[in-house]
Amino acid sequence: MMKRFASIAFAGLATFVALPAEAQNMLCGQRDVVVNELQGRYGEQVLGMGLAHQNRIVEVFVSEETGTWTITVTSPNGMTCLMAAGQHFATMGPVAAGEDL
C-alpha cells in the first residue's frame, strides 16, 4: 500500500501539494490530477461517494479488473487527499442487524 502511495506521489510530484496542519503527511492534490492518476495508472473508477463533515466529499475508487481500491476526501476548495488504498476489493450485500460479517 505504501509503495502505491509513493508511486502516485512521484508520478505527480510537481502537482501534489500538502494542505496545512490537517493534511500533513498525506498525499494531496487538485481533484482532477488525483482522479486522472487513479484512472490512468490504476484503472480505478468511482464506485460510490458521500458527504462528510465540513462539506467534504468521500469517494471510493475501485478497479474491477485488478481489485485495487482507493478512498479519497475532497475539500470544498477542490483539494483531494488519499486516505487509504489497498487490494482485493470485494462487493458485499447488506448485512442484517445482529448478523456477523
Image: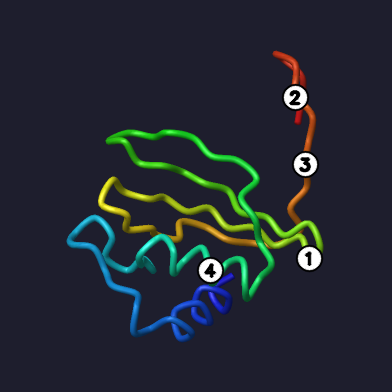
Q: Amino acid at mark 3?
A: Thr
**For numbered disc 3, what is the local secondary structure?**
loop
Tell me which numbered mark, 4 or 1, is placed earlier along the sequence. Answer: 4
Residue 29, percent from left and from top? 35, 67
Q: In the displayed structure, does residue 88 sit left or right of residue 45?
A: right
Q: Are marks 4 and 2 in contact (CB under 8 Å)?
A: no
Q: Which one is in front in this view, the residue at disc 3 or the one at disc 4?
A: 4
**Which class describes the residues within 10 Å of circle 3: few (<14), some (14-19), or many (20+)?**
few
Tell me which numbered mark, 1 or 3, is placed earlier along the sequence. Answer: 1
**Which class describes the residues within 10 Å of circle 4: few (<14), some (14-19), or many (20+)?**
some
* Cα–Cα gap, marks 1 and 2: 23 Å
Residue placed under numbered mark 1 in the picture? 66
* Cα–Cα gap, marks 4 and 2: 31 Å
Q: Is residue 70 above or below residue 50?
A: below
Which residue sits at x=48%, y=84%? 11
**For numbered disc 4, what is the local secondary structure?**
helix
Which residue sits at x=53%, y=82%? 7
Tell me which numbered mark, 1 or 2, is placed earlier along the sequence. Answer: 1
Q: In the displayed structure, does residue 95 sit left or right of residue 11?
A: right
Q: Amino acid at mark 4?
A: Asn
**Which class describes the residues within 10 Å of circle 2: few (<14), some (14-19), or many (20+)?**
few
Residue farthest along the top direction in this orientation: 97
Q: Amino acid at mark 2?
A: Pro
The label number, if any, that marks residue 91 in the structure image: 3
* Cα–Cα gap, marks 1 and 3: 14 Å
The label number, if any, that marks residue 36 in the structure image: 4
* Cα–Cα gap, marks 4 and 1: 17 Å
Residue placed under numbered mark 2 in the picture? 94
Which residue sits at x=78%, y=57%? 64
